[in-house]
Image (cartoon, coloured by chain):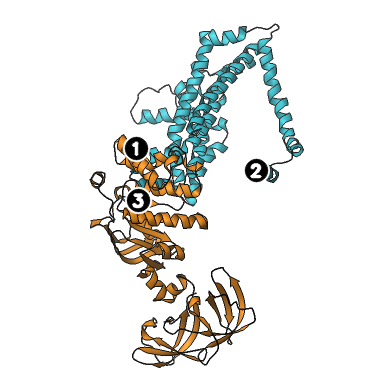
Chain colours: A cyan, B orange
Amino acid sequence: MNSRTVSKEASSGGALPNALALTLLLPLTLLLAGAFVTPILVLIFESLFAPHLTFEHYAKGLTQPLYLGVLMRTIRTACVVTAMCFLLGYPVALVMSRQKGRRVIYLAACVLIPLWTSVLVRSYAWIVLLQRKGIVNTALMDAGIISEPLKLLYTDAAVMLAMTHVLLPYMILPIYSALIAIPPDLDKAARNLGAGPIDSFFRVVFPNSLPGVYAGTIIVFILALGFYVTPALVGGPQSMTIATLIAQQTTELLNWPFAGALAGILLAATLGLVSVFGRFLRIGKGV
Amino acid sequence: MLASNRTEGRAIRGADLSITNLYKRYGKVEAVRGIDCEIKPGEFMSLLGPSGSGKTTLLMMLAGFETATSGAITMAGRDLTHVPPNKRGIGMVFQRYALFPHLTVAQNIAFPLKMRGLAKDDIRSKVARTLAMVRLESYGDRLPQQLSGGQQQRVAVARAIVFEPPVLLMDEPLGALDKKLREDLQIEIKRLHRDLGLTIVYVTHDQEEALTLSDRIAVMNHGRIIQVGDPRSLYATPQSSFVANFLGKTNFLPGTVSATSEDSLTINVQSVMLSVPRARYMAPGNAEIGQAVEISVRPENLHVVQGGPDALHGIVEGVVFVGAYTTYTVRLPDGVRVDVQLAGRDYLAEGEAVSLRLPGELVTIFSERAE
């Protein structure tokens, strides 16, 4: 009884009346329904009924080694990119969280400016760097380290490198906000209780930053799974990902039912992997 | 080595702390300037002062979170000045508890034991014993955020004493709690101090708390220790107007020295000639005839009298009933207001004329009043 009255009072203070809430949500709901949900449903419908109910396209996507290979490569690329973003991003977030005043702003700018730059520009920048007569090859040859230009561009490694660069801010920012939310007293308490700086980090700071790590991991992983621009520009035919494959099916081969099936597979894979992550997230929160 | 010795189950004994000529500068700001202090084994020493007085900086240097610019800290003869915090073996309780939110209560308390590499069984029994000491036996499996503020602070205390440190630092540990809880925990802290016999350095800006808990109090201001003493002598014999005003309440009355003798001074206060023992004269230099002084008198030391030549006459301007006593604000003819604390039931009314007696042996004389 008591708790009910309390929650009622609380809700009258914070929540909006239902009618107003619906009105505010309506424009976005309509936009999403029209521009996002409908096309997806149409696409998936086409992949299943062409013209009769068939799983032929899904079977093709999941059994033919060529397409299965693309799917696997996509997942592998997303995993590697996520891992690299974490390994490179966590130290940056940690340093950012330990700075004071103006230096935080400078560091944040370094992290954010790439985010504000077009993905296209950043991907072309990697082409300039990695191509046969690009900056990296020229520098290596001038230094006498190699005699022949290396094949750097249009490789899996190039795709992973460029995607890591593009997606890094999405990892740094959630980790940073998790780190600054940790009271500095926790680290002090750990030190006082006998932990050295390294013990204190791994036993106290890092476990408490895990919500940020999970958030960053999920964002980067989902974005990496469906990433199109960078693999299309920096990757070669051997490093095709599911997004570039879908694009090829729709724009070049006009095979909409198969593209729809691939999109459905990608969607299912994404949801499946995210729910696995979600389970980790709950464990991390100790619930 | 020290830690392994201590685990063999000998009784916890406090260690002495010695602070010598300690300075801390941040750029051009001097947070702590020249502190000398000897804290005896097993003593409860409070550092009392307003915010910015350097008391927290001093505590942080004792814990090792801040490095001294110059000077030295030694504990039981061991120089701690440049020892990192994790090697000091000093316990600490933070104002905001600083419990690890991802660990249970029992895991929090086990943390310092784990860091010292104790065996699992040993850890389990020590944790259970310490939980019992703070009366949280059944809370070991809870997470800190599932406990109330008072319970969390008791866990923090348990975590700070479980590894049997010779010295415990407490940084305004009750500051975040409400009054009733604060009083309960004060009693518990006192009990733990008595039972464990450890040395406690307790930072607070709450003078009542300092008076209640401490064996001795160091009153700090502007990065220095102004006066050290046991609560009663500090309260009765403040050596500066700052201490008189900060520790308890006091009234300041302007006066002039009108006669001096070997062991007493005669002060003209509000045209009343007040004889004060020389020992109550705290102003610098020798008292000169005609010198302006400030008389400090506690509200409870002023008494209502039936009139007479050596009484102050005034009008009651305000009445605050507190329960056990009543505080009256009395306006004297020249506009000076004094607070008078009376315990009796003969209540005075606003606007009533009243005569007050100044007890010459209980006042203190300063050269200036504290802001």
The quarter holding residue B70 reads bottom left
Amino acid type at circle 3 is: Gly
Q: Nearer the viewer, mark 1 or mark 3?
A: 1
Q: Which residue lies under the disc numbered 1?
A: B124
Q: CA distance from mark 3 to mark 2?
A: 42 Å
The quarter holding residue A56 reads top right
Q: How many C-alpha atoms fall within 10 Å of the one at disc 2: few (<14), some, or many (≥20)? A: few
Q: Chain of mark 2?
A: A
Q: How many C-alpha atoms fall within 10 Å of the one at disc 1: few (<14), some, or many (≥20)? A: some
Query: Tag 1, which secondary structure?
Result: helix
Q: Nearer the viewer, mark 2 or mark 1?
A: 2
Mark carried by residue A2: 2
Give the image location of residue B197, x and y in percent.
Answer: 31, 55
Q: Which residue lies under the disc numbered 3?
A: B91
Q: Is residue A91 visible?
A: no
How many discs mark residues in the rendered view? 3
- In the image, B136 versus A205, the foreground residue is B136
Q: Are marks 2 and 1 on the same chain?
A: no
Q: Is residue A247 left or right of residue B140?
A: right
